[in-house]
Image (cartoon, grey):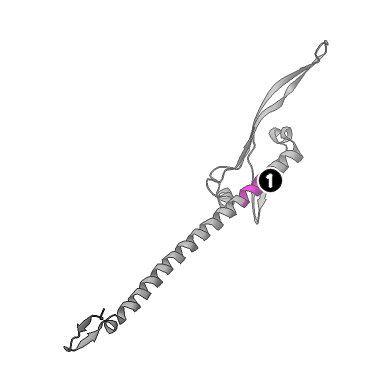
Amino acid sequence: MKPARFINARGGAMSGRHSQRGDALLEALVGTVLASIVGLGLSYTTAQMMVSQRYVASQSAVLDQMTASLTTSGVSNICAGTNQVNIAVGTSSLTLPAPTCTTAPVTVSVVGGSQSATLAAGVVTSMSLSTPSSNATAINIIGGNGVVAISE
C-alpha cells in the first residue's frame, strides 16, 4: 500500500511521514505527564505508609512501657495511686492519669477444712490504664485520638 499524500499550506504534496512529526512529540509529552502522575501517586502512598509505621511503632513502645510499669510496680500499687506511670517516646514524655480500678473482697477457704480468711481490703478484679484523651502530646506521639488502653 502506498503512503497517503497530503497537501501542505503552499499547495505542494507532503508524504504521510512528514505530516506526523509533531504527533510523536505530543505522544512523548502525554507519556511523560502520565509517568509523572504515577510517580506522584507512589510518593504519596509511600509517605502515608511511613506515617502509619511511625504511629504503630510509637503505640508499641507505649504499650511496652505500660506493661513494664504494671509488672514492676504492681497493679495494686498503681491502683492505690502510689506509683504514677510515665511514658517516654523519643523526646516526648507523658504522665498517665490514675487508672480505673475495681476491687472486691475475697474469701479463701480450704476444701474439707474449717479454716477461711477474708481479705477485707480486697483484690483488684478489673483495671483500665490508658493514655489521657484529648491530650496534644498523646495525639502527637500515638496518632489518631491519642488513646491507648490496657484493661482487664
Residue 5 lies within the magenta run:
no
Q: Main secondary structure of the magenta part?
A: helix
Q: Residue at x 44, y 64 (%)?
A: 38
Magenta stretch: includes residue 65? yes
Pick the front one: 49 or 35: 35
Circle 1: element type: helix
Q: Residue 81 falls in which quadrant of the image?
A: top right
Judging by the rendered image, the residue that carries numbered circle 1 is 64
Judging depth in this view, the residue of 109 and 98 nearest the camera is 109
**Nearest to the observer: residue 111 or residue 65:** 111
Residue type marked 1: Asp
- State the extent of the magenta-drawn residues as a range: 57-66
In the visual, does 36 lie left or right of 102? left
Say which residue appears at 22% left-offset and 83% top-offset.
Answer: 5
| Quarter of the N terminus within the rendering | bottom left
Estimate the x, y position of residue 97 in percent, counting from the top left.
Answer: 63, 40
Label tally = 1
